[in-house]
């Protein structure tokens, strides 16, 4: 398997593939970023060993199946490539056009995009039938769902390959069509936006909002903690993408989140968002 982009999502996807027994070639733009992803995967697999969920041999074998590269051409032997690079359409179009030249003609090309159109991404290739969406949730190793997104021209075979791959990676796949936000983000993004707007309306703190949703609606983590985990920039970008397509006011990012994004308060990854992190 090839994984293009080893940020939070790509590293999580690579970890799942390694644990499922695949040989993985992971590509990042610099070797430092690649090594950071290897360190992250090693850390989480190490925790599993400490907790008795994985043997030290299996961890070592899994890490041994990971090859890092900065050159997309090294993904040439892949049967499937999952792309998890930056959420920008132009970057993804360029990546898919390049992947098409590199991998064999029947390899499946999947994008982990959360809010862009898989159909538009597939249009960068001359073989859109082999392009699908495989949308994992953050944190990918822990969240059971993967949305298997059928783009306008995806073949039945590519969709089924992605579905079975999702199952092999230990996930619960759900097939859906290529509509803005697919299933979960179509609902979750406006919901999180409402939570942020209600902070000011109800005059509650992020802690109080989180407590309310955890104890009143059974959420595993409160909305402010969740937006910090997803990344304020990622959430704002996804909101903007959905608003652009659906024109529903609730999809638009609340000004408070846009200001946080502009100030560099990106959540957990920047050390500060609604909360501060060490
Ligand atoms: N990768 C791999 N392993 C990880 C990890 C990660 N990112 N984060 C944690 N772990 C491991 C750790 O080893 C941890 O154990 P230790 O603390 O002992 O090291 C273990 O998983 C369990 O972690 P937690 O104790 O934190 O687990 P939890 O029971 O509290 O559950 C959770 C954590 C699954 C994240 C839960 O809080 C949850 O379901 N939260 C909601 C998350 C959610 O809604 N995600 C969707 C975001 S939206 C999205 O992703 C869509 C999009 O396109 C933007």
Image: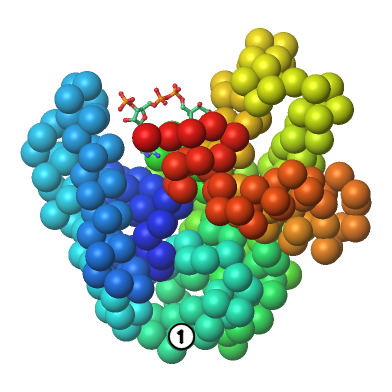
Instruction: Give coordinates of residue 38: x percent, y percent.
Output: 24, 54
Furthest residue to the front? 263
| Residue carrying label 1 | 98
Residue 268 vs residue 155, the one in the foreground: 268
Give the quadrant of ligand 1: top left
Q: Is residue 214 visible in this depiction of the protein?
A: yes
Horizontally, residue 229 falls left or right of residue 207, namely left
Q: Quadrant of residue 80?
A: bottom left
Residue 83 vertical position relative to residue 63 in the rendered view, above or below: below
Residue 195 higher or lower than 162, as above or below? above
Is residue 110 visible in the rendered image? The answer is no
* Residue at disc 1, secondary structure: helix
Total numbered labels placed on residues in the image? 1
Foreground of the two, 179 or 84: 84
User: The C terminus appears in which quarter of the rendering?
Assistant: top left
In the picture provided, is 81 more to the left or to the right than 272?
left
Q: Position of residue 274 (x, y in %)?
A: 59, 35
Q: Residues within 10 Å of mark 1 (few under 14, many from 20)?
A: some
Residue 58 position (above or below residue 2): above
Q: Residue at x 71, y 52 (%)?
A: 258
Q: Along the horizontal axis of the image, is 33 left or right of 171?
A: left
Dot 1 beta carbon under 8 Å from ligand 1: no
Residue 33: image quadrant is bottom left
Q: Residue at x 90, y 51 (%)?
A: 248
Q: Quadrant of residue 184?
A: top right
Q: Residue furthest right?
A: 248
């Amino acid at each position: 398997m090839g994984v293009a982009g080893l940020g939070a999502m790509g590293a999580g996807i690579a970890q799942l593939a390694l644990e499922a027994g695949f040989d993985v070639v992971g590509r990042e733009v610099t070797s430092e970023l690649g090594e950071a992803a290897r360190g992250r995967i090693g850390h989480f697999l190490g925790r599993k060993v400490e907790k008795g969920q994985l043997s030290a041999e299996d961890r070592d074998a899994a890490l041994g199946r990971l090859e890092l590269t900065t050159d997309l051409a090294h993904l040439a032997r892949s049967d499937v490539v999952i792309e998890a690079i930056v959420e920008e359409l132009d970057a993804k179009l360029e990546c898919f056009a390049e992947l098409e030249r590199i991998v064999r003609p029947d390899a499946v090309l999947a994008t982990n995009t959360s809010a862009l159109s898989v159909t538009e991404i597939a249009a960068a290739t001359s073989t859109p039938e082999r392009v699908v969406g495989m949308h994992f949730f953050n944190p990918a190793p822990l969240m059971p769902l993967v949305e298997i997104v059928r783009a306008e021209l995806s073949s039945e075979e590519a969709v089924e390959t992605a579905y079975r791959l999702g199952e092999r990676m230990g996930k619960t796949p759900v097939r859906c069509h290529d509509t803005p936000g697919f299933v979960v983000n179509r609902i979750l993004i406006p919901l999180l936006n409402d939570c942020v707007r209600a902070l000011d309306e109800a005059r509650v703190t992020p802690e109080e909002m989180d407590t309310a949703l955890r104890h009143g609606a059974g959420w595993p983590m409160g909305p402010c903690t969740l937006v910090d985990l997803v990344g304020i920039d990622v959430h704002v970008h996804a909101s903007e993408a959905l608003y652009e397509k659906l024109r529903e006011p609730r999809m638009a990012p609340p000004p408070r989140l846009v200001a946080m994004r502009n100030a560099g308060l990106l959540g957990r990854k920047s050390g500060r968002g609604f909360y501060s992190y060490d």
